[in-house]
Structures are given as structure tokens and as C-alpha cells.
Amino acid sequence: MPVDPARLDILTALSRKALWLSSWTIHHANHIRPNADGLKVGGHQASSASLATIMSALYFHVLRPEDRVAVKPHASPVFHAIQYLFGRQSREKLENFRGFKGAQSYPSRTKDVDDVDFSTGSVGLGVAQTLFSSLVQDYVKAHGWMKDRREGRMIALVGDAEMDEGNIFEALAEGWKHGLRNTWWVVDYNRQSLDAVVREGLWEKFETMFRNFGWDVVIVKYGRLMREAFAEPGGEALKRWIDNCPNALYAALCFQGGAAFRKHLHDEIGDQGPITNLIDKRSDEELLALMSNLGGHDMASMLEAFEQIDHDRPVCFIAYTIKGVGLPFQGHKDNHAGLMTVTQMEKYRDSQNIRPGHEWDKYEGLPHSAAELDAFLARVPFNQDGRRLTAPVVEVPQQLAFKPSPQMSTQQGFGLVLNEIARSDSELARRIVTTSPDVTVSTNLGPWVNRRGLFARAEKADLFRSEKIPSTYNWDASPKGQHLELGIAEMNLFIMLSALGLSHQINGERLLPVGTLYDPFIERGLDALNYACYQDARFMVAATPSGLTLAPEGGAHQSIATPLIGMAQDGLASFEPAFVDELAVIMAFGFEHMQRDPGEGGSVYLRLSTRSIEQAQRIMTPELRQGITDGAYWLRKPGPNAEVVIAYTGAVAPEAIEATGFIGESRRDVGLLAITSADRLHAGWTAARKLRRDRRGVQHLSHIEKLLAPLPRDCGLVTVIDGHPAALGWLGSVRGHRVEALGVEQFGQTGSIADLYRHHGIDANAIIDAAESLTTGAPVLHRKMAV
């Protein structure tokens, strides 16, 4: 049904106003704001113009409160402008666009104040996030938690050049597998990337690809002026010329103007009577208005395209646009870095009937009264309360149970802890949802899935079981299942964890996501992991097996840098326990940490191992539990005259313990420091130093400072980790102790653990040698001999 003409008139006016405000915001950031740093905001101006109509159609008419949107990064100014018109963004923050605590360059959930649904910026990830968020909404609904809330549509505004990103294609495949619904992607088909004009016929590839994955495709190519012209005598010839015109030429003519279009049309079509009359009866200005009236810039065409969708199948809208439309550099291939000059901006301001000094006035230049526009915006469905949702905290037991064995690996312990949770009917068990990229069994999630089942929107029996074929794993799929099995793409894993980890705000229902993958492949999905943390999504990722301890698998499966990644990644607390009782404490902490308020909690990374080691036999005291979660505790407390301390992390515990025993026979008061989280230790140390700097006189000490404080200044530290030695090498800076940092700095190879530890210098003998280099006295007599 066509939109009421009066409403269409207001929508068109608001679109024009949003474009003005976004253009003025960028101009202000570059030409007016004092103390500018000289950095230019180029691409935002052209991209905002490209999407102004599409975004206005969505936000001012189509969207409902339950809908969620990922805005194309460079369209952030027009998003902020729309929110300003809604009253959800301040003039102060617009004036400070790209400045400290101003409106963000790219929409950010955590840094912006104006109702950003999904952060965008790392190319393509916000797009994929909408797909996985739709799958999460299906999960929440299937478990009966939607209550009276309506399903929302997950919508992404996508640049056509953004479609080159591989994560988008990986996501499309996963959406098809899981029966994706309620997802719209709107492709801003302006046919320009940052450096060039895109290849001819790309839209056909997009259409074929999306249809192959089960999407509907709606192509919005022609605006109302074009469709009216096509209906005139000669209109079919004009349409053929437009359809056959190369992208680069069309863009160039849009920049050159109506006269250039006229010349090319006459030269290439010739004098054919009706078409010539169609062209010549229009002035140069009118002809340019006609030829630039692509579907993505025509409010009526966009509304018609959006409103024809009356189903929940995924839809790709390919909306033809001109990058920078309406601005002096529209269509120019250099316009990504283009900015209007002061003179051009003044001319543009005059064309919008905006008085100097009134550039920020909400309704300046519009023919409608403020009262009429206020009333209109107050009725806009999207501009209603209730978009930001919350969910109660899930109670976590102080101690998570597991069935102990004398010899275990942390990977095995991880599966045992989850299995014990799965046996219960607690709220914690109900809210955990697991996911893995085709490594569910090899990361010890199998017992959990046996008890809790695979998730699918429709019942699906395990055919091996129905055929009476014996199997360790019985994986029936149903709407009540609690494991989402993914294909082997780590980018999809982390974007899925991001979507699951925002459910408490997107769906109003808290989920406690747990994902597993092999530790070296953290790096394969690192961009998506960083994106998830930037959004403050909350999840637990268990990465296993790790390090060269994996031994026979070879160098490609042995991780080196991941401890440093865990330390450096904001929003992620990383742990590497050696013993399963440590792991159980850390997992309980992790489920609580995932639910804490912004700025206090975050996600959790567990770097685990397949190496089975002798387990510590001890009582888990409150003091020990606190040390484990703070990052370290004394496994062997040093005496007052300690000459050397061995500090270890993770699977090298047996070597550290063995070396400490040998060293202790000839060195005084040797200590053994178990480090469960170099990340937590380092973060606590840097936070304490900052507190002391900012509040002079405050004597706050971090956990690691307290642990190392009793050591004599001449005590040496030997650190050892199956990972990069820099992860622990900083410990000497805490109190000025000399350090020998042992670790792995080169790609591994196949071999036994003993071979590889000896080769890389992290075995007991290497630890003893390092201790000797830091101390004086007779050589350590009883060292383990190489086999």
C-alpha cells in the first residue's frame, strides 16, 4: 500500500534534514572545531549521503522497537543525526564528533549514548552479527523465554565493497544450515570502494549467491522519477541505456552533471524522436535529478520495497545509490576522502534554507512546523521506550563439582565440570549454551551435549542411534537442545559467541555462552574475538589443546602467542590453570564475571591442555580460591632468605615442580609460584600503579606486589610457560628482581613432549640451568638426565 502523501512528504523532509545534520557534523569536525588534530573525516561525508534516504525510511517509518540494526561504519554521522532528531543524541556530542567522548566515528555500543544496537567498524563483522543474533533470538524463543515480546528483525546496512569480506560468506553458509529467519541485509550498491569503482555485474553475483543460500532478493534500482520517465515515449530506450551504462561512466557522469549526461545520451542513442524529446524537454538540472534518482535515494521506492515483505525469510535488498549524492563530489572516484570546502558548504547551507548560526536547529529549513514534526517523531514506532533490556543474574555455586582422578588434564577437567553442571536442574545449567566449530568431541564437550542435546528449531533424531549403531555420543537435535554445532570457521564461532553474549540486552534473557576451539586457531578468529569484546559481549571460550605440549600434532597446531593475546585483549580475562581444582574455581569465577556490570566484568578465556598430570591433593580454602582467581598463589612458599623463585603457568607444572625439588637441595628457601592468570596479575599491577600515580599518597598494592614483596632484592626469578616467554618475563619489573624467562619463540614440530620441551628449553634441566645463572654456589648435583 502506498504511503500517505503527507507522511511521505515529512519522511522526505526528515531524510534531507538528517543528511544536512550529518554533513554539518563532519564539516564542523574538520573546519570549525578548535584544537583539531588535523585528521580528516573524509569517507563519512560521501557514505552518509549514500545511505541517508535508506536509513531515514527505516528509522522514521519501518523499524519497530524490537528490531535491531548494524549501521554501515561510515554512515555513523547520519545515524547520529537521526538519533539527534529523536532526542537521543546531544548537540554537544555531535559538535565533538570524533573528539574525546564525542559521537564515535563508527557506531559503538559501549562508547556512544544514542542507542547503538551493534558496534560496527571492523569491516563486515557487524553484518554477520545480525545473522547470528537472529539465530540467538530463535534459540531464546524455542526455549520459551520470549514471553510476550515480538520477534525482531536483525538488519544490517552493508556497503557493496564490504561484501568482499570473507566472514560474510562464512556467515551466510552457517545461516543456511540453521534455517535463518528475520534477517534483512540492505546493500548500499553505490558501486564504489575506497580506491575504485566495483566490477560490472556484481549485483548479479550477489543475487545468485543470496538466492542459493535461501534468501529472497529485492532489487531497488529505479526511483519514482525514473519510473515515470520510463513510462513516457522513448522511456524504454532510456532504461536500456541506464542498464547498459558501465559503473565507472555512470559515476563520472553523476559528478560531471546534466550536460554531460545529455551529451552521452545524444551521442550513444542518436536522434530517435521520442527519446530525444524525453531528454531535451528537461533542463540540465532536471536531467541530473532524473539520472541520479536511483532507488536507494527515493523514499517512496525504499518504503515500497521494505513494506512488501510480509514473511520471516531472510531478505537481501540491493539498493542502487550514488556515493555522495547531492554533494559536490557525488560519483567521483576520489570521494571517499572527499570533504566539502567552506565555500561549498555555505552554498549547500543556502540550498537547504538554513540561516547562518542555526545549523544545529533540529527543524531549521524544513517547511513543516516544529509542533507537527515533534508529534510525528513522537509517534515513530522505533522511537519508543523499552529497547534496552536487562536480565537478572544467574546464581553460580561457589564451588563447581567434578569427579577427580589422580591423573588428569585441564581439558578433561573442563568436560567433567560441565558434565556435572549438566546433570543438575539448576538455573545455571539451563542458561549455559555451548558452541564449537566442528571440534565438540575433541574439546571434551561431548558429555555435555549427550545430556543437554543439540539445538535445532525442529526435532531431528540421531540416526546412528535409531539404526542401533553403537556410539559414545547420542546427539538428538531439538528446540530444547543447548549446543549449537557450527562448521569449522572460527570467525563464525566468535561472532556467535558475541551474539549469545549480548542476549541479556538484545532479547532480555541472559545466556551464559561457552565456546570451544583449538588454541592456535584463536588467531584465525582474532578479528571477531576483538569485535565481540569491543561490544562488551559476555562469554567463556575454552581453547584447547594449547602450546607445543600437543607435541605429535606438529607446529601448525602448536600455539605460541596466545598467552600474549589473552593479556592484551581488552574485555577478556585469560587463565591458564595447571590443575583441575584450579579450573573448577576459575570456571565458577568466570560465570560470575560474565554477568557483572559494564566496566567490572567481561568475557573469559581458558587456555587448556591435553597433557595429563598428577593432580594436587589439597583442600580448597578461601585463601587459595582467592589466589587462583587473582592470578597466582604459592605452591611452595619461599623462606626469608630465598635465592630463587620458579614461577610457572599451565602444563609445565611437573617440570617446574621437579626442578624446584632439585634446586632446593643446594639453594636456600626456594619458592614455587603457581600463576593461573598472567593477565589478571598484570592488569592488577598496572591498575595499582595508575591508582598510586593519580592519587598520590595512596599505598594500594596489587596481588603480585604483595606476593613478591617478602623476597630479597637479590632473589632471582625463573619464569616458565609453554608459550611466549614475554607473558611472564615482566615479573622482574614488579620489584626489580633479575629474571630468566623461559618459553617458546619458534614454531614447533612433531615429537614427544620430552623431546620438544628439551629442544625449546622449558624442561626441568633448562629451569635448573636458568636458576644457576641467577645464583651463586655449587652446581645443582641431582638433575634429571636426558634420555
Image (cartoon, rainbow, N blue to C red):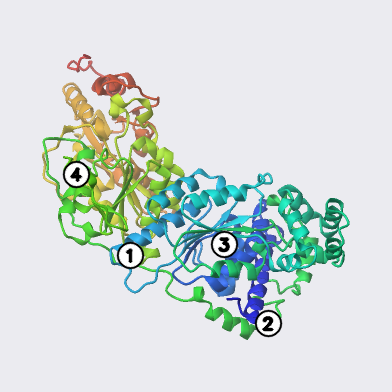
Is residue 617 visible to us here? Answer: yes
Disc 2 designates what residue?
368
Disc 3 designates what residue?
103
**Lower position in the chain sequence, tag 2 or tag 1:** 1
- Residue 684 image position (x, y, % from top left): 35, 48
Q: CA distance from mark 1 to mark 3?
A: 34 Å
Q: CA distance from mark 1 to mark 4?
A: 31 Å
Up/down of 264 relative to 616, above or below: below
Mark in front: 4 vs 2? 4
Amino acid on which disc 2 is placed: His
Q: CA distance from mark 4 to mark 3?
A: 60 Å
Badges 4 and 2: C-beta atoms under 8 Å apart? no
Badges 2 and 1: C-beta atoms under 8 Å apart? no
Q: CA distance from mark 2 to mark 1?
A: 43 Å
Q: Which mark is residue 141?
A: 1
**Lower position in the chain sequence, tag 1 or tag 3:** 3
User: Dot 3: what SS?
Assistant: loop
